Image (spheres, grey):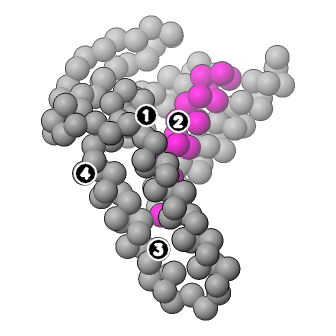
Amino acid sequence: MILSKILFMAGGFLCLALGIAGIILPILPTTPFLLGAAFCFMKSSGRLYRWLMNHKYFGPRIRRIGEAGLTLREKIGIYALVFAMLLPVIILTPSPHLRIFLIVLLAVKAFVFIRIKTARPGTVSVQAETVQGGKEEAENTDVK
């Protein structure tokens, strides 16, 4: 039991670190790693789970993706940014192996984006909630 909590906690910190790196690096997806961190912390430490879910930047993103998904505009914008950052590398790299890897990476990222729920614009509602000791207090706020 203690070993599983330690492993989940280590997995949570690893996912959180990769999620933070994904904010900066276009090849790493941020949100799946944050969702993984939330899952691992939920299994290992209530305190860390509450910290992540109440975090100023990460908490609303995790809740919104889980509840409503991304709008088509957000999906296209994110994918276009990643594509624009990787396209010069794909074109300028002399290594065919790296080129193939990056093209496959773009394809996998496109597949992941297709699998995320698509929310209609204007209907996305973020559940601004504070997670406290297993209880949740909710307040609806609209996001435009």
From the image, state whether disc 4 or disc 1 is nearer to you.
Answer: 4
Residue for badge 4: 73
Counting from the top left corner in percent of width and height, residue 41 is at: 61, 27
First of labels 2, 3 by sequence position:
2
Residue 77 placement, left or right of 12: left
- The answer to whether residue 65 is visible is yes
Amino acid type, residue under disc 3 in the picture: Leu
Quadrant of the image for the C terminus? top left
Please say whether residue 38 is one of the residues in the magenta stretch: yes
Mark pair 4, 1: CA separation:
18 Å
Residue for badge 2: 35
Mark pair 2, 1: CA separation:
6 Å
The part of the chain drawn in magenta is 26-44
Residue for badge 3: 86
From the image, state whether disc 4 or disc 2 is nearer to you.
Answer: 4
Which class describes the residues within 10 Å of circle 3: few (<14), some (14-19), or many (20+)? some
Residue for badge 1: 62
Amino acid type, residue under disc 4 in the picture: Arg
Q: Residue 104 sits in which quadrant?
A: bottom right
Quadrant of the image for the N terminus? top right
Which class describes the residues within 10 Å of circle 4: few (<14), some (14-19), or many (20+)? few
Mark pair 1, 3: CA separation:
26 Å
